[in-house]
Image: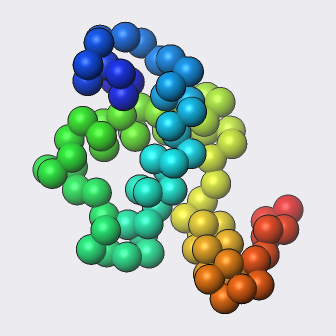
Amino acid sequence: MTILELFTGEKLMMIDIMLWPHAMRSMMVGGLIPEAKMERSRYPRLTSWFEEMSAVPAIKETQFSLEYFKVVTRSTVDKDPNYDYGL
């Protein structure tokens, strides 16, 4: 399911790829703040889209881990961004 499938029934499109980085980060916030976790029961279409996007080969190859997100986010909040983490 693509994000546009909610409205048009289309297959994977550029809009999915463009929205992916933002959606991924918003989903990862739930790993840092439990109250912000997107529950399947509350957001079934969005979580299904997220799972399907995570299975796209190009996404799988470039996706970063929750641990990476935590380190970079924490270092940025501490005003000492560690953009080289994991290189």
The one of 40 and 79 positioned closer to us in this rendering: 79
Q: Which residue lies at the image location 56% right of the left edge and 21% below the top edge?
A: 14
Q: Residue 58: x, y in percent?
A: 65, 30
Q: Residue 57: x, y in percent?
A: 61, 28
Q: Residue 72: x, y in percent?
A: 67, 72
Q: Is residue 23 left or right of residue 4?
A: right
Q: How many labels does the image show?
A: 0
> Does residue 71 appear in the picture of this structure?
no
Rendered position, 43 above or below 57: below
Q: In this view, does 62 lie to the left or right of 32?
A: right
Rendered position, 27 above or below 31: above
Name the residue at the left extreme: 41
Quadrant location, the N terminus = top left
Q: Which residue lies at the image location 41% right of the left edge and 56% below the top edge?
A: 27
Name the residue at the bottom extreme: 78
Q: Which residue lies at the image location 50% right of the left edge and 17% below the top edge?
A: 13
Q: Which residue lies at the image location 55% right of the left edge and 64% below the top edge?
A: 66
Rendered position, 3 above or below 41: above
Quadrant location, the C terminus = bottom right
Q: Residue 65: x, y in percent?
A: 60, 59
